[in-house]
Amino acid sequence: MIQVLLVDDHTLVRTALRHLLEGQSDIRVVAEADSGEVALRSLREVRVDAVLMDIMMPGMGGLEAIRRMLIQQPGLAVVAITSSVDVAVPRRLLEDGVRAYVTKDAPADELIEALRRAVRGEHYVSSRIAREMALASLPSRNDPFSQLSQREMQVLMMLVEGATNRQISDRLLLSPKTVSTYRARLLEKLGAENDIELLRMAMGRGLVSMSPEPSAGGESA
């Protein structure tokens, strides 16, 4: 029996996913979480074989939560689910140890197959994402997002979610000065002038859903 921790900040989505997963004879949802913080606590309290997790969540966010999960339990079968088709995110996650990456518009049987393969130690990527990754590997494709490091991507996601430099430094255990350096590097690499442009670029790539815009120039406190 595959025991699953289900992580999504929307109750209706978790309910639908639970119904789908528990309709399989070999899968059981043993815990649910509505944030990365709760997911990390659940992982310490309940034995699971796999984590099915939305990477676009408020608070710590899915990217940072996954990073900490894999430090806490190396080899854990993590299946990331998201509406984003931007190839920079799945490539980074797969490099960091995520077993599978599935978009929310994928067929239900594809999600089930991804979960089972992940538990077997195999990798799986939605066909739509696989096509985009193949195209992105072509020499003529110039994607500034693919040039971001894992930490830069984490800082970017938190910035566009409206987190201040202080909040980012607390969550990622970095000094505020280091966060400011990362922010400046992001602006340079992505060719943006302020946090509002970073938000618009991230939204344009499907990396974040509509949310209140951060103040231009960012927050340093």
Image (cartoon, helix red, strand yellow):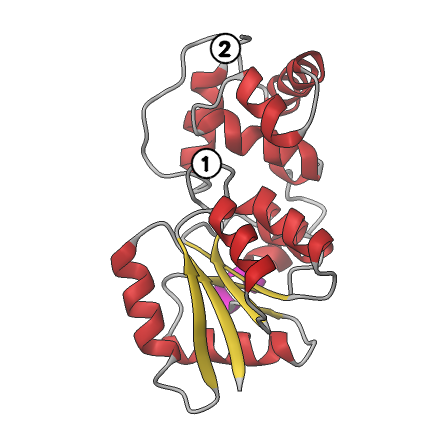
Left or right, residue 103 beside residue 120: left
- Bounds of the magenta segment: 127-131
Tell me the chief SS of the magenta region. helix
Residue 214 vertical position relative to residue 204 in the rendered view, above or below: above
- Judged from the image, the secondary structure of the residue bearing numbered disc 1 is loop
Given contact means CB atoms under 8 Å apart, are the residues at marks 2 and 1 in contact? no
The amino acid type, in three-letter code, at marker 2 is Glu
Q: Residue at x 50, y 13 (%)?
A: 194
- Image spot of residue 84 (x, y percent): 45, 49
Whether residue 108 appears in this view of the structure is: yes
- The residue identified by callout 2 is 219
Residue 110 vertical position relative to residue 100 in the rendered view, above or below: below
State how far apart marks 2 and 1 are (Cα): 17 Å
- The residue identified by callout 1 is 59
Q: Residue at x 70, y 17 (%)?
A: 175
Left or right, residue 215 beside residue 186: left
Front-lying residue, 103 or 174: 174
Front-lying residue, 197 or 104: 104
- Image spot of residue 142 (x, y percent): 64, 38
Q: Residues within 10 Å of mark 2 (few under 14, many from 20)?
A: some
Front-lying residue, 18 or 113: 18
- Magenta stretch containing residue 129, yes or no? yes
The amino acid type, in three-letter code, at marker 1 is Gly
Q: Residue at x 52, y 58 (%)?
A: 42
